[in-house]
Image: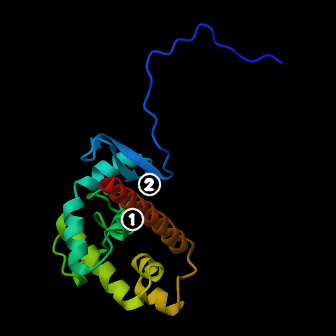
C-alpha cells in the first residue's frame, strides 16, 4: 500500500496552534492583557458574523453593565435579548412598531417613561428595567423571556410559555444566545486567571 506524497509542497510559515474552544470566536484585533485573542460568543444574527456583532455590542458595553447592575439583571441575559431583538442596531424597527436596541413597543416605552425610545441609553434603561420587572413577577428566565416577547398577560393566560410558534422560538433562541454569552464570559475570566 502506497501513501500520498507532496514532493513540491513547501511550508513557508508555521501558524501558532490555538486550543479549540467550542462556541467561542475571537476578536481579530482585540487582545487580552497577556496578548491572547479576546474571546467573544459565537452568536449570529441577521447574517452578521460573531465579530461584527461583538463590534456593535462593544459600543453599548458600559451602559449595559451599568444598567444591568442597577436593575439586578444578568448582563449576559440582556445581551442575549438585544442580540435577538435588534442585533445591537439602535435604529431597528419591527413591522409591529417596536423600536430600538431592545425593541420597545410605543405603549410599553410610555409605560416605562421612556421619552425617546430611539435614544440607545433610554431604550436600554427602559428595556432592562422591564426585563427586571418581568423576572420579579415570573421568577424564571424562560417565562420572563416569553413575557417580554408575547406580553405578561399571555404567560398568565397559558400558565407558562404561550403555545405561539414565534414565542417558543424566541425563548429558545435567546436562551441559546444567553448560554454563548455566559460561556464566553466564563472563558474570558479563565484567561484572566492564567
Q: Earlier in the sequence, mark 1 or mark 2?
A: 2
Disc 2 secondary structure class? loop
Q: Residue shown at 27%/47% (left/top)?
A: 32
Q: Residue at x 19, y 65 (%)?
A: 63
Per the image, the residue denoted by label 2 is: 43
Name the residue at the left extreme.
Answer: 115
Percent across and percent down for residue 43 are 44, 54
For the residue carrying disc 1, how many other residues have a C-alpha within 10 Å: few (<14), some (14-19), or many (20+)? Answer: many
Which numbered tag is attached to residue 127?
none
Q: Please determine whether, in this image, residue 154 is positioned above or below residue 86.
A: below
Q: Position of residue 67 (x, y in %)?
A: 21, 72
Question: Most extreme residue toward the right, as rendered?
Answer: 1
Determine the secondary structure under disc 1.
helix
Front-most of 21 and 76?
21
Identity of the residue drawn at 29% across and 66% down: 99
Compared with 154, 149 (above or below) is above
| Residue 182 position by quadrant | bottom left
Residue carrying label 1: 80
| Left-right relation of 189 to 165 | left
Give the residue at the far top of this rendering: 8
Residue 117 in view of the camera: no
**Closer to us: 60 or 117:** 60
Say if 159 sits above or below 21 in the image.
below
Amino acid at each position: 500500500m502506497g501513501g500520498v506524497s507532496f514532493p513540491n509542497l513547501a511550508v513557508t510559515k508555521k501558524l501558532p496552534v490555538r486550543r479549540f474552544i467550542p462556541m467561542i470566536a475571537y476578536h481579530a484585533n482585540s487582545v487580552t492583557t497577556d496578548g491572547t485573542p479576546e474571546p467573544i460568543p459565537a452568536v449570529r444574527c441577521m447574517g452578521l458574523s460573531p465579530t461584527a456583532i461583538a463590534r456593535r455590542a462593544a459600543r453599548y458595553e458600559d451602559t449595559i453593565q451599568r444598567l444591568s447592575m442597577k436593575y439586578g439583571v444578568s448582563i449576559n441575559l440582556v445581551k442575549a435579548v438585544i442580540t435577538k431583538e435588534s442585533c445591537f442596531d439602535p435604529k431597528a424597527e419591527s413591522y409591529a412598531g417596536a423600536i430600538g436596541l431592545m425593541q420597545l413597543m410605543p405603549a410599553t416605552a410610555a409605560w416605562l417613561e421612556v421619552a425617546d425610545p430611539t435614544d440607545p441609553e433610554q431604550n436600554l434603561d427602559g428595556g432592562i428595567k422591564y426585563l427586571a420587572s418581568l423576572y420579579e413577577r415570573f421568577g424564571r428566565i424562560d417565562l420572563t423571556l416569553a413575557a417580554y416577547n408575547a406580553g405578561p398577560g399571555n404567560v398568565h393566560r397559558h400558565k407558562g410559555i404561550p403555545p405561539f410558534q414565534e414565542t417558543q422560538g424566541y425563548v429558545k433562541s435567546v436562551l441559546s444566545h444567553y448560554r454563548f454569552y455566559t460561556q464566553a464570559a466564563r472563558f474570558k475570566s479563565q484567561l484572566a486567571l492564567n
